[in-house]
Amino acid sequence: MLWTVFVILLVLWALGLATGATLNGFIHILLVIAIVVVLLRVIQGRQLA
C-alpha cells in the first residue's frame, strides 16, 4: 500500500514538472513526505531484522 502511494506521488510529481502545474509546490511537498515515510519504513525494517 505504501509503495503504491509512493509511486502515484512520484508520477504526479513528474507530471507536474513536465507541465509546470504543480499547484504551488503541493505535489513537491507530498513527494518529500512520501520519501521520508519510505525511508523511515526501510530503516525500521532493517533494525527489526
Image (cartoon, helix red, strand yellow):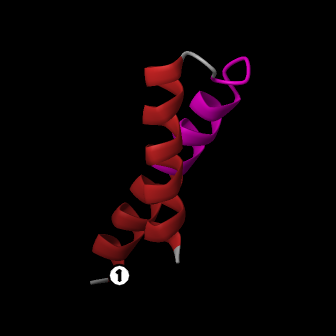
Residue 48, x across and y down, in percent:
35, 81
Is the residue 29 above or below the residue 48 in the image?
A: above
Q: Is residue 35 magenta?
A: yes
The amino acid pointed to by label 1 is: Leu
Is the residue 41 above or below the residue 17 in the image?
A: below
Of 45 and 16, the residue lying toward us: 16
The structure residue drawn at horizontal position 35% and vertical position 65%, both measured from the top left corner, is 42
Q: How many marks?
A: 1
The boundaries of the magenta stretch are 22-36
Q: Residue furthest front?
A: 19
Residue 39, x across and y down, in percent:
40, 54
Of 14 and 47, the residue lying toward us: 14
Residue 28, x across and y down, in percent:
58, 29
The quarter of the picture where the C terminus appears is: bottom left
The structure residue drawn at horizontal position 41% and vertical position 69%, both measured from the top left corner, is 44
The structure residue drawn at horizontal position 28% and vertical position 72%, both measured from the top left corner, is 46
**Relative to 7, 12 lies left or right:** right
Q: Is residue 5 magenta?
A: no
Secondary element type, mark 1? helix
Of 20 and 44, the residue lying toward us: 20
Is the residue 1 above or below the residue 14 in the image?
A: below
Residue under numbered circle 1: 48
Main secondary-structure element of the magenta-colored stretch: helix
How crowded pointer 1 is (Cα within 10 Å; few <14, some 14-19, many 20+) is rated as few
**Relative to 8, 24 lies left or right:** right
Is the residue 31 above or below the residue 25 in the image?
A: below
